[in-house]
Image (tube, rainbow, N blue to C red):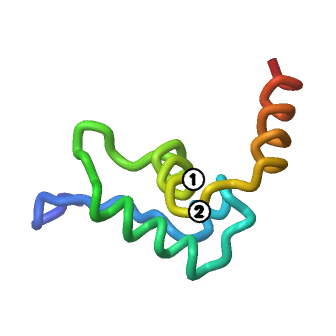
Amino acid sequence: MIDTNRQIAIIWSVEDVQEVRPDLNDEQAMKVLLTVKKCHDAAIGVTFETLEIAADNIYPREENEDKKAYNIVNSIL
C-alpha cells in the first residue's frame, strides 16, 4: 500500500515518558512530550534519551534518585 500523502508520523505517549521517568504522573509526562515537540531538532529526533533529558530538565530528580540510577548503571557495567 502506498501512502498518498507521502508522510509518516511517529507517535510518543505519556507511557513512553514514564518508561524513563516512572515517578512522573500523566500530566507531568504530557508536559515533557509538549516540550520535546516544541524543541524538536530533526537532526536528533525524539528518542528515549531525549525524553529523559527533557524530563530531567523540567523535573529534576531528587538526589537519592540520581544515586539509585547511578548504582543501577554501575551494577550493569
Q: Which mark is residue 59?
A: 2
Q: Residue at x 51, y 69 (%)?
A: 13
Q: Secondary structure at mark 1?
A: helix
Mark-to-mark CA distance, 1 and 2: 5 Å
Q: Is residue 21 left or right of residue 63?
A: left
Q: Residue at x 29, y 62 (%)?
A: 9
Crowding around mark 1 (Cα neighbors within 10 Å: few <14, some 14 to 19, many 20+) is: some
Identify which amino acid the numbered label 2 is placed on: Tyr
Residue 34 percent across, percent down from the top left: 38, 70
Viewport quadrant of the N terminus: bottom left
**Residue furthest out toward the front:** 63
Q: Residue at x 52, y 42 (%)?
A: 49
Identify which amino acid the numbered label 1 is placed on: Asp
Residue 35 percent across, percent down from the top left: 38, 65
Residue 23 percent across, percent down from the top left: 74, 65
How many numbered discs, if any? 2
Vertical placement of residue 29 versus 62, above or below: below
Viewport quadrant of the C terminus: top right
| Residue, disc 1 | 56
Q: Of residues 67 and 74, which is closer to you in this image? A: 67
Circles 1 and 2: CB distance less than 8 Å?
A: yes
Crowding around mark 2 (Cα neighbors within 10 Å: few <14, some 14 to 19, many 20+) is: some
Q: Of residues 7 and 27, which is closer to you in this image? A: 27
Q: Quadrant of residue 76?
A: top right
Q: Residue at x 51, y 47 (%)?
A: 53
Vertical placement of residue 62 versus 13, above or below: above
Residue 2 percent across, percent down from the top left: 18, 58
Q: Secondary structure at mark 2?
A: loop
Vertical placement of residue 38 versus 28, above or below: above
